[in-house]
Image (tube, rainbow, N blue to C red):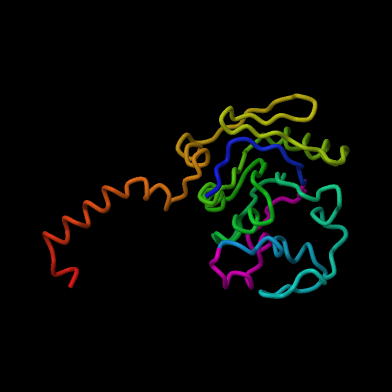
Amino acid sequence: MEKFTTLKGILAPLDRANVDTDAIIPKQFLKSIKRTGFGPNLFDEWRYLDHGEPGRDNSGRPLNPGFVLNQPRYKGASILLARDNFGCGSSREHAPWALEDYGFRALIAPSYADIFYNNCFKNGLLPIVLDGKIVDRLFKEAAATPGYSLAVDLPAQLITTPDGETFSFEVDAFRKHCLLNGLDDIGLTLQHISDIKNYEARRRINAPWLFN
């Protein structure tokens, strides 16, 4: 998992509440578990004017000009701004996979669905919770300023706007440690690889019938 320390990037405002995981990555794309390749189909039913299918070349598909990610001013955005209850619905890990594969590293919203929120940390995304009034301000500033960007400092737990204003955010200490060090569940387990190998060696001696 890629480490997350600091990030400066364009903010893309998705002005919708209760965005569910089927909107983030529709169900037909869940056949793959490779964790990569989902970016072109992020928000598929909103980004395109036709129906998407796995394995289809997206380069010739008609784009929805009214959808935020199709607007040139938000090209290359790495921070997504959303409304309440982002990531609700089914608990598919494909949702954070798609967001990260598209290029997002941080999310900002007043609230998230619990399972989605947990899945983000496990897949290298930083889901930031900010007060609704601050989120409202960011939506207005992003709409008024082409190329509007934010700086996210995870060690200091601060967001800095282009005019230098800062907002602090809370993050669980263990989750922060994992993001700073690029540790997913497998990475955490491999930190104890010598203990695991020693245990396996003892088991081979004490219970050899299990290995026949």
**Of residues 143 and 102, the one drawn nearer to the viewer in this rendering:** 102
Total marks shown come to 0
Q: Which residues are magenta?
A: 13-34
**Of residues 127 and 196, the one drawn nearer to the viewer in this rendering:** 196
Q: Quadrant of residue 37?
A: bottom right
Is 75 a magenta residue?
no
Q: Is residue 50 above or below residue 10?
A: below
Q: Is residue 3 above or below residue 115?
A: above
Is 32 a magenta residue?
yes
x%, y% of residue 151?
70, 33
**Of residues 108 and 35, the one drawn nearer to the viewer in this rendering:** 35
Q: Residue at x 67, y 49 (%)?
A: 104
x%, y% of residue 88?
61, 55
Q: Residue at x 70, y 65 (%)?
A: 41
Q: Residue at x 59, y 30 (%)?
A: 157
Q: Quadrant of residue 163?
A: top right
Principal SS element in the magenta part? loop
Image side of residue 47 versus residue 154, left or right = right
The quarter of the rendered structure image containing the C terminus is bottom left
Q: Is residue 135 above or below residue 91?
A: above
Q: Is residue 189 above or below residue 24?
A: above
Image side of residue 7 versus residue 162, left or right = left
x%, y% of residue 91?
54, 59
Image side of residue 98 versus residue 122, left or right = right
Q: Residue at x 40, y 47 (%)?
A: 188
Image side of residue 179 versus residue 141, left or right = left
